[in-house]
Image: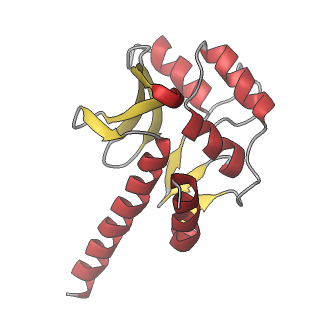
Amino acid sequence: MNKYDEIQKLVFEAGNSVDFADFGDGISEEWITKAEERLGFELPNSYKWWLINYGGGEIYGEEIFSIYEQDFDTVVGGDIVYNYELNIKNKNYSNEKLVICEANDDIFYFDLSKRRDENEILIYSLNDNKIYADDFIEFLKERITESKREVMTIMKKQKV
């Protein structure tokens, strides 16, 4: 089973805990191209696969930034282009950090200086300042399983 089949299975098994569009109902490749042109760099292949197939969404209530398919000059919220430009404008992060998720426990970003073979980019944890995932699919798997463990721990504590 390849990594794309694995993540489809994991998303399906997560049920309501993962709120993505139905598989196949993602965004158009035209909007990905527009986003890449606006950003000035190519997005990683695994991230583009997720955008095309799932479009965007949340894992246990934490939004994964996507492309909203709206004019980049007026869009707000969890649009990745909007957030990147806002972070650069406000000098929150260097232009080498493309934030993909502002979770309750951490901020995760593509380190654009760490582009690898097959057009993949390492994902870092801002809190730990270390590699969190080798690609976007691994990031999704980690967030889904990590969040599930945290929820289970909280539920066990509440029963005691």
Q: Position of residue 22 (x, y in %)?
A: 71, 61
Asked if 27 appears above or below 1 in the picture, the reply is above
- Left or right side of 9 for 155: left
Q: Residue at x 60, y 25 (%)?
A: 82
Q: Residue at x 54, y 27 (%)?
A: 83
Is 135 or 56 nearer to us in this picture? 135
Asked if 40 appears above or below 155 in the picture, the reply is above
Farthest-out residue, bottom: 160
Q: How is the image coloured?
A: secondary structure
Q: Residue at x 70, y 37 (%)?
A: 68
Q: Quadrant of residue 52?
A: top right
Q: Quadrant of residue 8?
A: bottom right
Q: Quadrant of residue 127?
A: top left
Give the number of callouts.
0
Is 22 or 86 nearer to us in this picture? 22
Q: Position of residue 9 (x, y in %)?
A: 56, 67
| Residue 70 at least partly seen | no
- Left or right side of 71 for 117: left
Pick the quarter of the image with the C terminus. bottom left
Q: Residue at x 69, y 50 (%)?
A: 53
Q: Position of residue 45 (x, y in %)?
A: 58, 34
| Residue 18 at least partly seen | yes
Q: Position of residue 148 (x, y in %)?
A: 38, 67
Farthest-out residue, front: 1
- Left or right side of 127 for 123: right
